[in-house]
Amino acid sequence: MTTPDTVAARPEVVRLEHVTVRYGDRTVLEEIAFAIPRGEFVGLIGPNGAGKTTLLRAILGLVAPTAGRVLINGQPARRGSRRIGYVPQAFTADADLPLRARDLVALGLDGDRWGVSLPSRARRERVDRMLEHVGASAYADAPVGRLSGGERQRLLIAQAMITEPDLLLLDEPLSNLDIRSSREVVELVRHVATEHGAGVLLVAHDLNALLGAMDRVLYVARGRAAIGTVDQVVRTDVLSRLYGYHVDVLHVHGRILVVGGDEREPVGPHEDEPHEVSAAPLHGS
Amino acid sequence: MPWWRYLWAPGLATSGQVELALVVGTTVAVVSAVVGFFVVVRAQAFLGHALSDMGATGAAGAALVGVQALWGFLAGGLAAGLTVEAGSERAHDRDLATGVTLSFTLGLSALFLQLITQDTSHAGVTQAILFGSIFTVAPSIEPAMIALGLAAIALVAVLFRPLLFASLTPETARARGVPVRLVGILFLLAVVTAVEQSALVVGALLSTALLVGPAAAASRLTDRPGAAIAVAVVIAVGAVWLGVGLAYDSYLWPPAGRGWPVSFLVTAVVFLVYVATRLGRRAPTGGADPTEAV
């Protein structure tokens, strides 16, 4: 776990200020405000339809906020920034697809450029180094269609990290993995991000997979968000305010369960409650 | 006549007809293989097939008004391709849109062909459109075929990296600023060119074999994208040369004087190669056993 002072002192890689995203009548994100410094691992947790995907798209510059602004390294977010590495949930590939693991990772380097890449030793070495970082050297020349889910995730992480981004965004990387692979991927992400000094925003359904790995949790529900340590945010009162109705947070053998109550009994957001639970420096948990 | 004459008929090496067929056929083979690699990667074989069938409608319409078949094929494929593209971006919707549009255009084909063949001088048009007419290709379109072929190959070369990126991990490509939709549309133009040129040679119904067969066979023989394209080209060109040569020879085969269709011979060679690559277990490649844990 990073100590609070070192993390708080690092430059911010992403900052959202009063970000609201509306599609017509629908408010998908409302007054989202938070900042992630380099090197911090933040888990983005929340139910389906809460606005997590829209939040990611806003950070990637694919969606312009209706109000507020998104800053990447102090600059407004724009599409196609190499400062952000994006890791999708998965990819589909036929078993016979003639594409090796190293080819997939190499696409992260120059897949956005037109034309064909000329073979170059420097390019190959960079890909080899990245493969080694994620522990995929053993299957560097294997066709991607024959790799397991966990192996594929490693490649996707390598593909995203090869431009040495300042922020790594992972869109539900653990959803298709068994528990063991899940833990290994989380550990790998922590390790790789720490080595490169990158910030991490990892979207997951189950926050338990990230306990002990993430520094803070960004909990999003009904388009509203709260950020802080798990102890600060994942509490009955905070989450009930976010959801707008009563939810219970239960602790069972070191695992956390969020159980929804009755949607018909609303709990309104209090005007005097800040949406960012902790604006003060973090205290390690 | 010695037995080998049945495989190397008199005049094979000097026939102007054969020469033209080989030039046109080689162009088609190379373009089909190069484009076909990405069609296989993007799992768009059905779309490719539908485009050539819909091109047949254009060719039938062209015959009706007395225009060169190639332009009819291209126009039909282009119109169909853009219609399908204008529909939804999602694979599922695209599949349905393709099927429905295809059904309608096949119906139109039936109408046009019925109208043409009422005039007996055009009796062979249906056969030519559906199954190819490489030996009756007009020499005047040779330059157009080569130019179109080169243009399609150049387009795929320019699209190579973003197309591969967008085909494999579209969200990542989008996040990195690749214009995924535009790349898809440009590739569609290349596909239309490839299948419609191919339809002229092996017919609308069989052009898919040249498009998908060599690339599918190549993907069993190599793991690398560049090598796969090269192998696909070799298979496609080989199949066309064999097909053309044997079709010329076949005038000596029973039934004497009729000749076997080039399209059948070409697609038979492609199919045989494809089957051959699937015999026996695929050799294990350097990689972890996928049944082991991560």
Image (spheres, coloured by chain):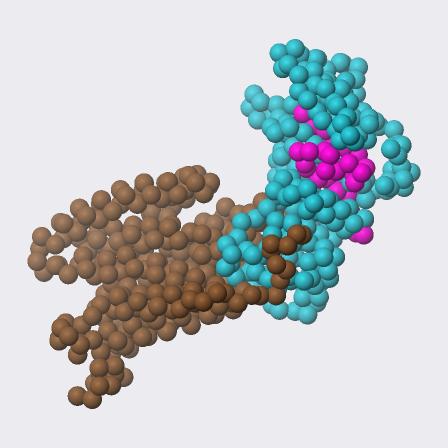
Chain colours: A cyan, B brown
Residue lying at the far right of the rendered structure: A5
Residue at image point 76% right, 14% down:
A271
Residue A209 magenta-drawn? yes
Residue at image point 66% right, 52% down:
B293
Residue A128: x and y, percent?
70, 63
Q: Say whether residue A231 is visible.
A: yes
Residue lying at the far bottom of the rendered structure: B2
Tell me where the magenta segment starts and ends, as one range: A195-221
Residue A105 quadrant: bottom right
Which quarter of the rendering shows the C terminus of chain A? top right
Residue B31 magenta-drawn? no
Residue B175: x and y, percent?
62, 45
On the picture, is B33 further left or further right than B52? right
On the picture, is A186 further left or further right than B277? right
Residue A248 quadrant: top right
Q: Say whether residue B142 is visible.
A: no
Where is B283 relative to B53, above or below? below
Residue B184: x and y, percent?
47, 50
**Count of marks overlaid on the render:** 0
On the picture, is A173 further left or further right than B113? right
Residue at image point 20% right, 75% down:
B250
Residue at image point 68% right, 36% down:
A204
Residue A242: x and y, percent?
71, 21
Residue A239 quadrant: top right
Which quarter of the rendering shows the N terminus of chain A? top right
